Image: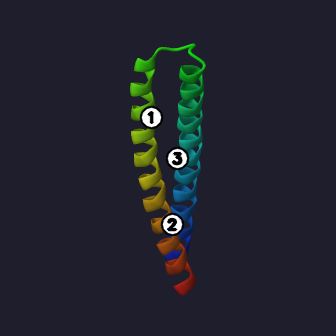
Amino acid sequence: MAKIDKLKEKIANKREFLRGFIVLSIAILSGVVITVFKVVATTLDMYMLFFVALGLISLSINIAIIKKIYENLDSLTEELENE
């Protein structure tokens, strides 16, 4: 029973990390969209597109992390089902 409880705890922890990274990606994406809109509306200068590029890079890194967490969560779930 101890191994099953440990697996359940690991799954719960991974889910919390997954939720946090999904919220972070939504925040990054909303910032990128707002910045692009303000640049197009000429409220901000064109050099702000540099920050859009940084946002897109950080978003892609965040999506890669989400993918790894999801794969790890999937393998832990399969291991729990095999127990």
Q: Residue drawn 54% across and 25% down?
A: 35
The amino acid sitting under disc 3 is Phe
Q: Position of residue 69 (x, y in %)?
A: 47, 59
Gap between marks 1 and 2 measured at Cα: 26 Å
Q: Are marks 3 and 2 in contact (CB under 8 Å)?
A: no
Q: Dot 1, crowdedness within 10 Å: few (<14), some or many (≥20)?
A: many
Q: Mark 3 or 2 closer to N-term? A: 3
Task: Give, as a three-letter code, the residue at label 2.
Answer: Leu
Instruction: Please name the residue that numbered disc 3 is placed on.
Output: 21
Q: Are marks 1 and 2 in contact (CB under 8 Å)?
A: no
Quarter assignment of residue 34:
top right
Of label 3 and label 1, which has the lower sequence position?
Answer: 3
The x, y position of residue 63, in whole percent, is: 47, 51
Q: Quadrant of residue 27?
A: top right
Q: Residues at badges 3 and 1 in contact (C-beta under 8 Å)?
A: no
Q: Which residue is mark 2?
A: 73
Q: Residue at x 52, y 79 (%)?
A: 78
User: Nearer the N terminus, badge 1 or badge 2?
Assistant: 1
- Disc 1 marks a residue whose amino acid type is Gly
Q: Residue at x 59, y 41 (%)?
A: 26
| Residue nearest the viewer, comparing 79 with 44 | 44
Indicate the position of residue 6 as horizontal and vertical percent values: 50, 68
Whether residue 54 is visible: yes
Residue 55: numbered disc: 1
Q: Nearer the viewer, mark 1 or mark 2?
A: 1
Q: Secondary structure at mark 2?
A: helix
Spatial distance from mark 3 to mark 2, Cα to Cα?
Answer: 14 Å
